Structure formats: structure tokens, C-alpha cells
Image (spheres, rainbow, N blue to C red):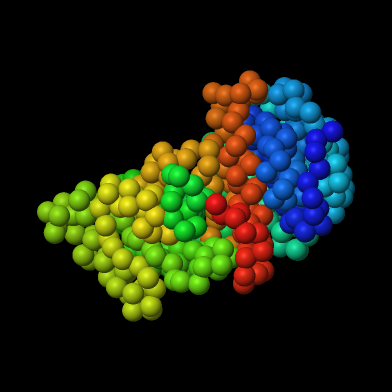
Amino acid sequence: MLDQPSKQASRPLLAVTMGDPAGVGPETIVGAWESSQFHLACRAVVLGHPGVIERAANRRGNRVRVVEVESPEDATGEDISVVPCIACCSDAALTVPPATIDPRGGRAAVESLDLAIELALAGRVSGITTAPIHKAALRSGGFSQPGHTELLAERCGVDDVAMMLYLSRSRRAKGRIGLGVVHVTLHNALRDVFRSLNIETIGRRIRQANEISQTLLRYHGITSSPSIAVAALNPHGGEMGLFGDEESTTIGPAVELCQAEKIGVNGPFPVDTLMVRAAEGEFDNVVAMYHDQGHIALKLLGMYQAVNVTLGLPIVRTSVAHGTAFDLAWQGQANCSGMVEAVRVAALLSQARTVTTPSLEGQLS
């Protein structure tokens, strides 16, 4: 049996969704289950199909035992070699071939997510961590939303959510709380990004970046205000209009609007040098204009340490920063460190929402 963590009752209870059964999600869950950091951070219950999770454990040769439970309260954490799993999708999940886009996989992933949201909204779990889904499988399963973020927004009844990629404080992200990157646009074709940018939307993302940074700073016992940087859109920040004028017509006015609200934000800065400055600790959070502008930089800094955090929800939700990785799925080779970090950050954020002073000294470092 694995070593037991201390202070079981004080650890938040999290729901971990199975993700697409054709991908690496089930393997990352059972692999992460053997990490002491995982269990020091939380108690957890898996939502999905127990047969899929058991198959993943056998494929990896993990020293865990999958047990079907009826409710999240059954996940006591007393024996961390036991993986409690609530069966919430049909047996069709067992028939999905590995590394295959399949509507049954898309439906199983959403069924797991729907239960996680229901439990979190009811206060029965402190937060949720999601294993990856495949967007094409989602579409083939009959869902119009392009990904987790949009599904979460719809199910939670909110209109304005944002994705933040987050790196905890480390030698690669040297800031006071590490580094977050909030994205103004997300799952958009690049040709659509320009028409999607406006002063109001950029302003909302700056405020969201400021709010989550305040929460993390306060939780870590830091009373000073966040430092937020905003990325330019065009090369070299537009070079005074030579390469585009969005910096002066749209992004700059949004920054000035938020500065008038006493938010510690500056920019727009050319993103190539901005991300170097941010990684060195000059800023707590960066507001990026589009998906790859933020994702590439953060994933180069720490592919398996970066955590996807959804901002604007009434619940805590984190996810691994990688996808279903069909090239590695069901070969026993999946890297599980991203799942460990996603669970750890979900536990941290669930506690940060309820305290005004740090109770887990060093959790961000």
C-alpha cells in the first residue's frame, strides 16, 4: 500500500474527469495517483467509467486498485492505493479504440464533465480537474462547443470566461506567484482574431488577470498589488503603425481604461521580449491577444508544469495543458506530471477562494 498523507480531513475533495477514453487522460490519472504530491494536495474521486480506468492502471502496471463508488463523499482518502470512481458514462466507453476519433469517446468525456460540474455547483466537491478531450470527437458526438472552456461556460450559465495558463513559481517562472497568461481570444481561426479584439473585451481580460493574481498573492501572504502586462498584437508592437495600428486604436486604450481603475497594468509590449521579462519575474500575469501567442511561450517554459485554469466560473476548474496525445495513448508512456500539477493547482485555488491569509505556506513555490 502507498504511504498515507497526513491531515486527510483538511485536504479539499476534487473531482477528476476521465476525458476522452481514446486518449492519454485515463493513463495520466492512474499515473498521477501514485504521486505523493497528488495526495498531499487533495482527496479525489474519478468520474468516468471504472473499466476504462482499471484498464489504464493495468496497461501502466500501476499499484492502484479501482473501486466503483456511488458518491464523492465515499472518497475518504484513507487508502490512497484505491482509486474511487463514479460510473457516469455508458459501457460504450469501453468499446472506443485507442487513439481514435470516436463519437462514443466525445460523449463519454462530456458525461463525465457534466457530473463534475453538477457536483461542484452543489458544493459537494471543492473543484474539478479535467483530463483532455478531443475536439473532433466532441463534434462527432453531437456537441457544438469547441472545447472544455465553452462547455463549462454554458453549463455554468456564464457568458464571459477566459483561459489562463499558469506556471507555479520555479526557476522557469521566477515571479512572486509564478506566471499566468490570460488569453483575450481562444479557439478562433487566426484570421478571425483581429475582428474579435475590442477595447471592452481586452479590458475584461485585464480585470480577470488582475483578480486571479490578487487571489494568489493574497493567499501567499503578499499584500502588494499585482503587476499585469499586456501583449501587443503586431510584430514589434506595430512600430508606430508601420505594421498595424491595433496597439494604438484598441489595445492601448483598454490598458489606459484599466489604469484609470487603479489596476497595475502596462503595455502593450512586443510579445517576444515581454515573455522573457515575465518569466524573469517582472510581471505576475500577461494578457495575450490570441491562443498561440500565450500557449507557445508558456509551454516552452514548462510543457508539463503548465496548468489550464478557467476564469469567470462560479467553480474551480483546472486541466492539463496538453491534449489527448493519440501518438502516445495506451502505450504506457504518458507523462503524468501535468495531471499532478493540475490537481495541485485546483486544490490551491479552492482553498485560496476561502481564505484571506496563507494556510499552505510554500504551495506556490
Q: Is residue 86 left or right of residue 129?
A: right
Q: Residue at 62% x, 70% y: name it.
A: 357
Percent across and percent down for residue 216 are 54, 63
Q: Is residue 219 left or right of residue 261?
A: right
- Quarter of the image for the N terminus: give it: top right
Q: Nearer the viewer, residue 362 or 158?
A: 362
Q: Is residue 289 left or right of residue 37?
A: left
184 versus 26 height, above or below: below
Q: Residue at 73% x, 51% y: name it.
A: 42
Q: Quadrant of residue 84?
A: top right
Q: Is residue 275 left or right of residue 64?
A: left
Percent across and percent down for residue 73 are 85, 54
Q: In this orientation, does residue 36 appear?
A: yes
Q: Residue at 59% x, 65% y: name it.
A: 219
Percent across and percent down for residue 61 are 74, 23
Percent across and percent down for residue 213 are 49, 64
23 versus 47 height, above or below: above
